[in-house]
Image (cartoon, grey):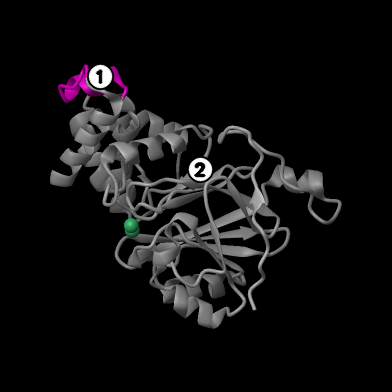
Amino acid sequence: MPRERPLQRARPEPAHARLTAPAPFFSLRGDMEKQMPAIVHQFMCLDDNFGVLVHDSVTGATASIDVPEGAPVLNALSEIGWTLTHILVTHHHKDHIGGVDEVRRRFPDVEIIGPAPDRARVPGAHRYAGEGDVVKVGALSARVIETPGHTSGHVCYHFYADGLLFAGDTLFAMGCGRAFEAPAQVLYSSVMKLAALPDDTRIYCGHEYTLSNARFAIKVDPDNPRLRERLVEVERLRAAGEATLPTTMALEKATNPFLRAADPALRKAIGMETAADADVFAELRERKNKS
Ligand code: ZN
Ligand code: FE
């Protein structure tokens, strides 16, 4: 039977606060903290989904962030020699949970964490976690951030001590998810919650949409020199068949138009100099839908 343990409540610091990791069970603590025990392995699934495994090198615990497709996740685990202990689900879409059952048959003891705001559409999880809850993967800790918009119950997982964010389909490199289940203004609040995380946060996303996002971004933010440089770099990576992720929060704040609704040059470029930031975001989302 799955273990039923109450979720730990996060301490009431702001979302960007760096918390100290709980003490590991043996005395290497200082060294391990310096080494950042989390190892991330990213690979492709389906057409353009990312599979992502997070491994705690101290305890051996390994989480899959979503399971877009069974076989690539199982292959990645066996190639790298990790045993799956957790699945952390961001949202109910098929391309994020479609492989859960297959993986669970191979790893029957896996503990599945689902988004508390979307229990009904992510059935079968052992536990559900919502805003501020802390999920443990071995000695690693992830704080849950609710980010409604793409779906009403979408959650992201922030491994605060390791500086890792798993953003699902809320935030992409130079883009964001479509606002399928909430007004764009709600999605804007969600992406701004993520933008409050530290600049050096490494961000993993659900899809390799970066090139298409970059080509849109340059249209609405044409005089942004860092965006121009990044477009060239992303074209090079994609031509070589390489992934463009992870990204960082600093890079997104500098180049992602969906995090730059307050930027005067961007607002001028789209003729919305006096609009509210959330309405600029909504207009960007609308234009991207049509592009
Ligand atoms: Zn989705
Ligand atoms: Fe998706």
Asked if residue 138 lies in the magenta stretch, the reply is: no
Decide which of 113, 223 is in the foreground and name it: 113
- Rate crowding at label 2 as few (under 14), some (14 to 19) or many (20 or more) other CA atoms within 10 Å: many
Q: Tag 2: residue type? A: Arg
Q: Tag 1: residue type? A: Ala
Residue tagged by mark 2?
Answer: 202
In terms of secondary structure, where does tag 1 sit? helix
Residue tagged by mark 1?
Answer: 265
| Residue 268 image position (x, y, % from top left) | 19, 19
| Residue 45 image position (x, y, % from top left) | 37, 66
In which image quadrant can residue 129 be found?
Answer: bottom right
Q: Residue at x 44, y 57 (%)?
A: 90
Decide which of 49, 114 is in the foreground and name it: 114
Asked if residue 269 lies in the magenta stretch, the reply is: yes
Cα gap from disc 1 to disc 2, whole angstroms = 26 Å
Decide which of 24, 31 is in the foreground and name it: 24
Q: Which is more N-terminal, label 2 or label 1?
A: 2
Span of residues in magenta = 262-274
Q: Residue at x 62, y 77 (%)?
A: 109
Q: Residue at x 40, y 54 (%)?
A: 153
Quadrant into which the C terminus falls = top left
Decide which of 236, 82 is in the foreground and name it: 82
In which image quadrant can residue 96 be found?
Answer: bottom left
Mark 1 C-beta to ligand 1 under 8 Å:
no
Where 193 sits versus 83, above or below?
above
Residue 205 shows up from this direction: yes
